[in-house]
Image: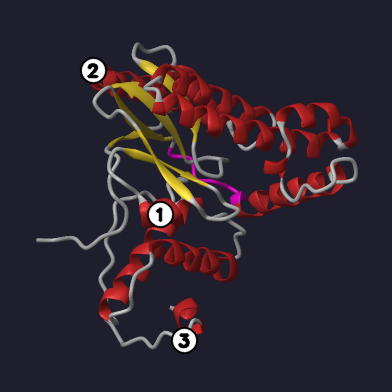
Amino acid sequence: MAELTKADQPLCGWDAVIYGNVPLGAGLSSSAAFEVASVYTLSLLNEIPFDPAQAALLCQRAENRFVGVQCGIMDQFISALGKKDHALLIDCRDLSYRYVPLDSERVSVVVCNSGVQRGLVDSEYNARRRQCEEGIRLLSQTLPGIEALRDVSVEDFEAHQALLPEVVRKRCRHVVAENQRVLDAVHALENGDVEKMGRLMDASHRSLRDDFEVSRYELDLLVDRAHVFEGVLGARLTGAGFGGCTVNLVQRDAVEAFVRQITEAYREKTGIVLETYVCAIAPGVGKVED
């Protein structure tokens, strides 16, 4: 509301009841969903034209300024612009985007909530952002013209990574490689290669664990155990890490068995009753009709 007011949008008073079933603090973007839903509701009540991309930016500003987390635009963007049975490729520099089909007839997305609350996630997220910014500053001394790690190819990074202190090098290596994995994932999905998509998810988790260092025992356990079971194509942590959830790409005919087996395996190792969510890829924000 404060950001809308700053944008010179007059707002009427309103009474609201808030209901949601997205777990809080689990890395599933509950805050972004709430922010986007709030802006959409206020737009309807005040007859303000709703621009999904601009709404996402406004919500990001609220998260940055009010909450104090220097998050990017991804969570708010997918909440505002999601499309049924599609992933969303976002260019965070110019905010262009395109939809990428995901074959929901063949695979399902299964989220496993570790039950471990994320500790120090905001401060650690901001620390990693600062480390990446330091990497950009150092790399720009020999790679003129770069403004972000997206401007650095995997080959250029490998050639110049010795310039960076070890921790900064690891953080930047994750981001550079993850950017390439995103492009590879788009190619895989557009070609219906869900097996390759799964392998990219596995590589992403290893990088998050070893280079970005945002995983923990329970998340690694879930990812490792997932691959014991038939029909699991890939698994990785999701969100900012340090707890929360994993996301698993599972063949549709194996979902029921996977949920049962991973729940039992996790309980045996940790004593925690695992929460699982078999997800449909749904549209973004919209009015709920009776």
Identify which amino acid the numbered label 1 is placed on.
Ser
User: Residue 9: percent from the left, percent from the top?
Assistant: 42, 84
* Kind of element beneath mark 2: helix
Q: Where does label 3 land, which residue?
A: 8
> Residue tagged by mark 2?
253
In terms of secondary structure, where does tag 1 sit? helix
Q: Quadrant of the C terminus?
A: bottom left
Q: Quadrant of residue 258?
A: top left
Residue 181 higher or lower than 196, as above or below: below
Label 3 to label 1, Cα distance in Å? 27 Å
Decide: few, some or many residues near mark 2? Use Cα within 10 Å; few <14, some 14-19, many ≥20: few
Q: Please name the residue shown 90% across and 45% down the image.
A: 141
Q: Which residue is tagged 1?
A: 30
Q: Which quadrant is home to the N terminus?
A: bottom left
- Is residue 101 shown left or right of residue 91? left
What percent of the width, then of the height, locates residue 160? 85, 32
- Magenta part of the protein: which range? 115-121
Residue 244 x %, y %: 48, 41
The residue at 23%/17% (across/down) is: 253
Counting residues from the N terminus, which is met first, the one under dot 2 or under dot 1? 1
